Amino acid sequence: MADYLDTLNEPQREGVLNTEGPCMLIAGAGSGKTRVLTYRIAHLIQSKQVDAFNIMALTFTNKAAKEMRERIEKVVGSDAKNLWMGTFHSVFARILRAEAHHLGYPSNFTIYDVDDSKSLLKSIVKEMQLDENIYKPNILYNRISSAKNKLIGWQEYVGNAELMGDDAANMRPEIGRIYKTYAQRCFKSGAMDFDDLLFNTDKLFKEHLEVLNKYQHKIHYVLVDEFQDTNLCQYYIIRKLASVRENVCVVGDDAQSIYAFRGADISNILNFERDYPDLRIIKLEQNYRSTKNIVEAANSVIKKNRAQLPKNVWTENEEGQLIELIKALSDNEEGRLIASSIFEEKMQHQLSFSDFAVLYRTNSQSRAIEEALRRMNIKYKVIGGLSFYQRKEIKDILAYLRYTLNQQDEASFRRIINLPKRGIGDTTIDKIVVAANDHGTSIWEILQNPSPFVGGRAAAPIEDFVAMIKRFQLETERKDAYDAAFEIAKGSGLLRELYEDKTVEGLSRYENVQELLNAIKEFVDQPEREDKSLGSFLQEVSLLTANDEDKDKDPDKVTLMTIHMAKGLEFKYVYLVGLEEDLFPSQMMLSSRAELEEERRLFYVAITRAEKRLFLSYALSRYRFGRLKNCEPSRFLDDINSAFIKTSSKSGSGYQSTPNYAAGNSQYAKSLVSSIRKTNTPPAISSKPKNTVAYTPPADFTPSNTDQLQAGQKVEHPKFGFGTVQALDVSGAERKARILFDNFGEKTLLLSFAKLKIHA
């Protein structure tokens, strides 16, 4: 028997050895699921003699796929390089590159990132002469993305009375037409957005059965990591690929399903057995990560959820210290207390700053924490900030590279046509786009003969631009990615323009472009890489995931991130901040049990990131939406069995700290959280909902025009019911109303989204 099997516990061994037929590994937090998935693949190759070319393993980050491949390679050798392994998007992009012609796309189609998609949507709204304050790119992108994840194309969308009715009720009746135009423009540009990589793979398999049959017989085993995070489209593709042999193994934890806002459907894992009646279910319940106190506290939280797969997570690790609860008078004091605690714990236990993480529900919470850490000269890094590949100068160079390969790419054309400035204004660009649309041809065709459409003076710089792009095309045909990219960066004039800007910002931008070229050189110099073309590099960059770019030269820093970003990570010391009603759980997630249970799963994920110590904190007041708000401790604090939590001596000014107590002192423990609620909340109008049962509006509910809304008016909301407007805030870009609802307390709502019905 292979040596690697000796390192596994009994359920893990079962998960590795039982390779035939449908299998679901329910993997509790810290239970070693990656090890099981890795060794299962290694076992298929080494012991079952399965060709690596016949195995597909799907993950959600390139980083996870890279780590798994490296582990497998240590067991089976270079065969691991032949696996179909990567993120859903990268693996399906690989299939689409080979098969895109069936759908009418070129094999070198461009992959639009989120910014590209939003830029195109903004252009479409402008061309349609719609209100840009109503049809915002974020709203449009999320609506279209949600539709695609549910396999709803634009044709189905505009033909669906319910969807169109929802848009009309939200004062956005043109979304269907925008979706149609967006899809057609992407197709015309030879471009797919991230969602298209999934949507079009499903379409390919659905409409071209010969292609599906080809991959069904090529892929003998399908393995899926983080299965609870899959959406409907991903699940349908998995089912199609595995339908011949049914050798499908999914690994996940329903208790860590926290991405519904991205389209993840928890029913995929909860109902998996319905689609595979002979499913083998293996539970990985031993936690190797956290102390007993942390594991038991997490268990006490998640058992409050109704929708879940039963399991009993346990650990043989040490009991560990109790969870500490820190109370602060304000968000600024919360930051100060946490920074002080990190410093004290580091010095007392000889730790590194990299052992610490601060997690929060929303990005805006990092401000107070960052300020406090800076005051104490504590080094930190914020995960989820501006990505290197989202910086303007990087996107400018990448747009040149993309357009060189695909002249149908409208988004890249708009970005580079007058960059650096070459005397081609917005009016000229609009004339070119309109001419292409009116004549049913591509922008590139118009560019090659611009005089009839833009006039003589504007034609000359356009002709120079076309000649330059054709010259770049020749470079890409005979040079590798680095040499071609260097010639394009230099030949476009961008490199010189950045070099001549001697400001601090200009030097930084120039250095960033040099770093991009370094990255391309590193890509080309990898000895195992067969395809060193510019197209291959651009595909890899387009499919980078949020956790793939952490190349900090000084890793000894405290990590700050949202809980969503922390999933899959672990730290010795974790500080979970902002445990207040309407913040965590979010006030936007209180209208149904399903939403509240997702918030509780998010809380569970945060708790289970901690290995040795866990600190929870909340503030009694916090600035939100520009005003100071009194806060109440989160209901989630009551979900923790009080035997596993204590009040910290680090709690804020004006508060008499509570001494530590033993876990067995249950009588004192049980009264702890509730007594904090009763004695420390400042007098104010309660923002805590009186209940969490969603209000059901009448069938004829129709939102009113809120342009003339005034304080004192009675209003009705489709989720929060009836309330009275307390005040209006018209100082910012978005009008807001502070409303006291009869059953849900006080809410501050953006009027452009609120869907309020005004009652006389």
Image: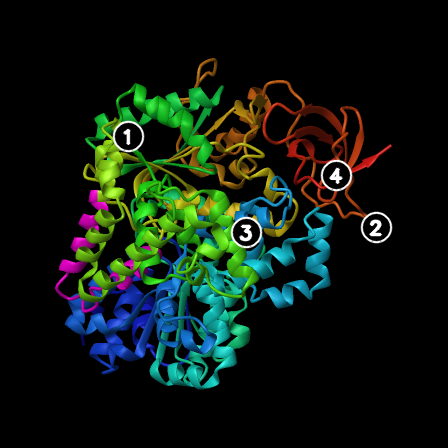
Instruction: Determine which residue is flagged by label 2.
Output: 700
How far apart marks 2 and 4 lie (CA) works out to 13 Å
Q: Is residue 668 above or below residue 184?
A: above
Instruction: Determine which residue is flagged by label 3.
Output: 142
Residue farthest to the top, as pictured: 654
Q: Are marks 4 and 1 in contact (CB under 8 Å)?
A: no
The residue type indicated by label 3 comes to: Asn
* Number of residues whose C-alpha sits closer than 10 Å to that of mark 1, classed few (under 14), some (14–19) or many (20 or more): few
How far apart marks 3 and 4 lie (CA) works out to 22 Å
Q: Is residue 540 magenta?
A: yes
Res 99 → quadrant? bottom left
Segment colored magenta: 514-542
Instruction: Determine which residue is flagged by label 4.
Output: 756
In the rendered structure, the answer to whether residue 502 lies left or right of residue 215 reads left
How far apart marks 2 and 1 lie (CA) works out to 56 Å
Residue at 54% x, 30% y: name it.
633
Label 1's element? helix
Question: Residue 545, position in %: x, y?
Answer: 35, 53
How far apart marks 4 and 1 lie (CA) works out to 45 Å
How far apart marks 3 and 1 lie (CA) works out to 33 Å
* Number of residues whose C-alpha sits closer than 10 Å to that of mark 4, classed few (under 14), some (14–19) or many (20 or more): many
